[in-house]
Image (cartoon, rainbow, N blue to C red):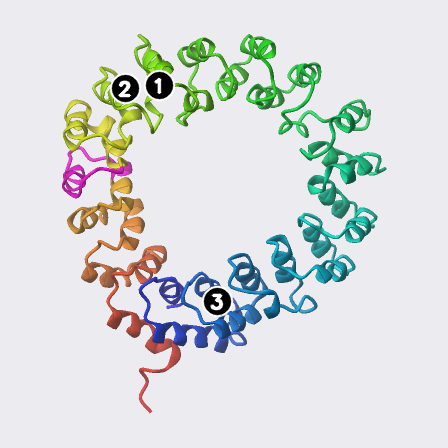
């Protein structure tokens, strides 16, 4: 029953009276069943209709719940004692809603884990920063070095602990001159540490991009700070993974990107250079004789209507599959895709945000079927009851369908007894679960249904 109650606690349609009973249950079981009480409290913590006294009571029950409540703005500074709930206090400081004096107290906390968390908080008082910079635990100082301001980072670039200096190098706020000095440090290997920096000299990027490790070269291949000349050098790298990674560079020339797409698989995500392309560039690429290039454009989700519709009728199934989830496609166009390419495009058509309930029902009846298509139908906001009932026959789609509010109430109730606990928990959290069924789930737990 515990998994059902945790699912019920997250149900957005749960009546206030049942919320009160679940909160009381979580507090009551804190001593006898602490793990269940923690799980239940955490599930309740995400609710928008908790009263303030309930928030405070749940926060006191488990500190990880208190941290969640603090970060979700349900717990205020007046509700937290930094001495008994230091992690919640740090969370509030990190969110900018804690009290400044807490930072002084927490910087002297005996747990290095608390000081480590504090070190990444923004807006710390200068004397707290100084204290953390002199912390006896190098991991605490390194965490501060990773997030602190430029002047402090420059100071910590001289720290004797190489972990701290490495963190300074990875901090985007560190002044370039400090980074260049660290790059000459014989005790440090900065090949990964500088991968997020976009303001370094091309000579340093060239050195980093010549690293013998393929992964390092691939990482710098899509760093936006790498300039045109080095992009061309990386395009000739002997390792395919490096050349493929270059496709994700936001400033890669379109002619080079087209070559990379034809030669290598560039993944299924929209590439930054395509996302930034002009309508004229998109139209030109969409007219390429190479399907791999047209696929680059087909992954864009804000295409001019003319380009979108042309790609929807593309003679290559992979291109059609890529454009199928594009919003704005008509039902007729989506049905035509299925008629032409069947199982090759079924899942992607089901993922289209404008797919109608009738179309989704037809997709569940397609033979042969596609399991991934059922998963897409089961999570689609337009899915109808009949479509969702069909999804219940598939093991992976069943979990998604069990949580869908369009699933008929009688089916939701039946799934409470599903042998898969995850499915049953999802059904308990379904807002279509009848209120009477919600109440029945609670009766054995809080004793309301027992006879004296």
Q: Quadrant of residue 101?
A: bottom right
Point out the tag, 3 or 1, that comes first from the N-terminus: 3
Left or right, residue 178 beside residue 409: right
How would you rate the neighbour count of disc 3 (Cα within 10 Å): few for under 14, some for 14-19, many for 20 or more?
many
Q: How many marks?
A: 3
Residue nearest the viewer, comparing 73 with 157: 73
Q: Disc 3 marks which residue?
A: 41
CB within 8 Å, label 2 to label 1:
yes
Please name the residue shown 14% across and 41% down the image.
Answer: 358
Left or right, residue 275 beside residue 194: left
**Residue 219 % position (x, y):** 58, 24
Please name the residue shown 24% across and 26% down the image.
Answer: 344
Instruction: Nearest to the eye among marks 3 and 1: give it.
Output: 1
Left or right, residue 48 beside residue 423: right
The N terminus lies in quadrant: bottom left
Q: Quadrant of residue 181?
A: top right
Q: Disc 1 marks which residue?
A: 279
CB within 8 Å, label 3 to label 1:
no
Residue nearest the viewer, comparing 53 with 379: 53
Q: Residue 20 in magenta?
A: no
**Residue 257 % position (x, y):** 45, 13
Tag of residue 307: 2
The region drawn magenta spans 353-373
- Secondary structure of the residue carrying tag 1 is helix
Please name the residue shown 67% across and 27% down the image.
Answer: 194
Compute the Cα span from label 2 to label 1. Answer: 9 Å
**Residue 297 % position (x, y):** 35, 20
How would you rate the neighbour count of disc 1 (Cα within 10 Å): few for under 14, some for 14-19, many for 20 or more?
few
Point out the tag, 3 or 2, that comes first from the N-terminus: 3
Q: Residue 367 in magenta?
A: yes
**Residue 273 % position (x, y):** 46, 20
């Amino acid at each position: 029953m515990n998994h059902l109650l945790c699912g019920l606690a997250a149900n957005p349609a749960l009546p206030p009276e049942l919320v009160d009973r679940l909160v009381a249950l979580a507090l009551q079981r804190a001593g006898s069943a602490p793990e269940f009480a923690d799980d239940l409290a955490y599930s309740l913590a995400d609710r928008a209709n908790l009263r303030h006294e309930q928030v405070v009571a749940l926060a006191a029950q488990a500190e990880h719940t208190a941290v969640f409540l603090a970060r979700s703005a349900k717990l205020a500074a007046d509700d937290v004692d930094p001495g008994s709930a230091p992690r919640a206090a740090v969370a509030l400081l990190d969110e900018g809603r804690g009290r400044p004096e807490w930072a002084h107290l927490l910087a002297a906390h005996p747990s290095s884990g608390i000081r480590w968390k504090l070190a990444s908080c923004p807006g710390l008082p200068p004397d707290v920063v100084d204290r953390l910079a002199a912390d006896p635990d190098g991991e605490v100082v390194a965490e501060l070095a990773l997030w602190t301001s430029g002047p402090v980072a420059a100071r910590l670039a001289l720290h004797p602990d190489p972990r701290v200096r490495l963190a300074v190098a990875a901090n985007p706020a560190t002044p370039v001159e400090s980074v260049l000095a660290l790059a000459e440090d014989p005790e440090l290997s900065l090949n990964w540490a500088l991968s997020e920096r976009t303001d370094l000299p091309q000579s340093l990027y060239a050195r980093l991009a010549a690293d013998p490790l393929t992964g390092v070269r691939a990482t710098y291949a899509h760093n936006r700070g790498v300039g045109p000349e080095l992009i061309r050098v990386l395009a000739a790298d002997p390792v395919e993974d490096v050349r493929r990674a270059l496709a994700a560079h936001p400033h890669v020339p379109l002619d080079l990107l087209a070559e990379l797409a034809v030669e290598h698989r560039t993944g299924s995500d929209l590439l930054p250079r395509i996302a930034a392309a002009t309508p004229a560039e998109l139209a030109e690429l969409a007219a390429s004789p190479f399907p791999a290039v047209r696929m680059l454009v087909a992954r864009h989700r804000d295409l001019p209507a003319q380009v979108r519709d042309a790609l929807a009728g593309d003679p290559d199934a992979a291109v059609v599959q890529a454009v199928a989830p594009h919003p704005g496609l008509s039902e007729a166009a989506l049905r035509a895709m299925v008629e032409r390419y069947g199982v090759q495009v079924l899942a992607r058509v089901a993922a289209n945000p404008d797919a109608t309930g009738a179309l989704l029902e037809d997709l569940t009846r397609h033979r042969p079927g596609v399991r991934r298509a059922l998963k897409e139908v089961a999570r689609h906001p337009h899915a109808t009851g009949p479509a969702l009932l069909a999804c219940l026959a598939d093991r992976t789609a069943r979990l998604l369908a069990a949580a869908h509010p369009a699933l008929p109430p009688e089916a939701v109730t039946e799934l409470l007894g599903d042998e898969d606990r995850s499915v049953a928990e999802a059904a308990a959290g379904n807002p279509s679960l009848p209120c009477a069924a919600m109440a029945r789930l609670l009766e054995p737990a809080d004793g309301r249904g027992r006879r004296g």
